[in-house]
Image: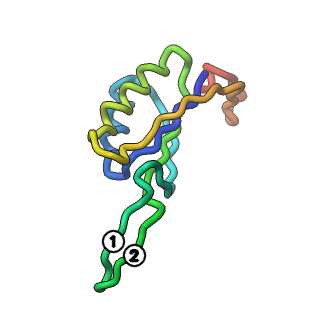
């Protein structure tokens, strides 16, 4: 089992959600986050004053999947979230040692 974590642009959420559903993957967790990568923020103008925006708004999407579904999830996210421009985000894949469904006590793949 793996945890696929994607940092995406906020306006791409609906596209990513639809792509994940079409790929047959159920369930996702969403968090609003702020951060920056290589782009290191940008400057904006507000009431004639220029100021630097270091942390840009992003969304963190987390999806727990079985090992055989990892590549499917990654491809769906990449296609849906990509714009071809800087700041599209990143995808991280980490191993899940154990998963437990609280309500039923099911474990691992059965809990996904």
Comes first in the chain, label 2 or label 1:
1
Q: Which residue is more in the foreground, 74 or 1?
A: 74
Identify the residue shown where x is 42% and y is 60%. 41
Q: Is residue 73 above or below residue 43?
A: above
Circle 1 sits on which residue? 44
Distance CA(mark 2)–CA(mark 1) = 6 Å
Q: Quadrant of the N terminus?
A: top right
Mark 2: secondary structure: strand
Q: Is residue 17 above or below residue 55?
A: above
Identify the residue shown where x is 47% and y is 39%. 6
Q: Is residue 22 above or below residue 85?
A: above
For the residues bearing labels 2 and 1, Cβ distance under 8 angstroms: yes
| Residue 39, x across and y down, in percent | 40, 52
Identify the residue shown where x is 32% and y is 51%. 11
Q: Give the total of numbered labels.
A: 2
| Residue 106, x across and y down, in percent | 68, 24
Identify the residue shown where x is 52% and y is 31%. 4
| Residue 18, x across and y down, in percent | 32, 35
Q: Which residue is more in the foreground, 49 or 81?
A: 49
User: Which mark is drawn over residue 51?
Assistant: 2
Mark 1: secondary structure: strand
Report the side of 10 relative to 28 (left or right). Answer: left
Badge 2, how many Cα within 10 Å: few under 14, some, many 20+? few
Q: Quadrant of the C terminus?
A: top right
Write down the quadrant of residue 81 in the picture.
Answer: top left
Write down the quadrant of residue 13 in the picture.
Answer: top left
Q: Which residue is more in the foreground, 86 or 98?
A: 86
| Residue 17, x across and y down, in percent | 37, 38
């Amino acid at each position: 089992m793996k945890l696929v974590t994607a940092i995406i642009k906020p306006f791409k959420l609906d596209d990513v959600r639809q792509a994940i559903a079409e790929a047959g993957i159920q369930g996702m967790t969403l968090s609003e986050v702020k951060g920056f990568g290589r782009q290191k923020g940008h400057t904006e103008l507000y009431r004639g004053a220029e100021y630097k925006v270091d942390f840009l708004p992003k969304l963190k999407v987390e999806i727990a999947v079985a090992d055989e579904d990892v590549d499917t999830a990654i491809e769906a996210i990449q296609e849906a979230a990509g714009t071809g421009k800087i700041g599209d985000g990143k995808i991280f894949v980490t191993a899940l040692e154990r998963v437990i469904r609280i309500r039923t006590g099911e474990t691992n793949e059965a809990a996904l």
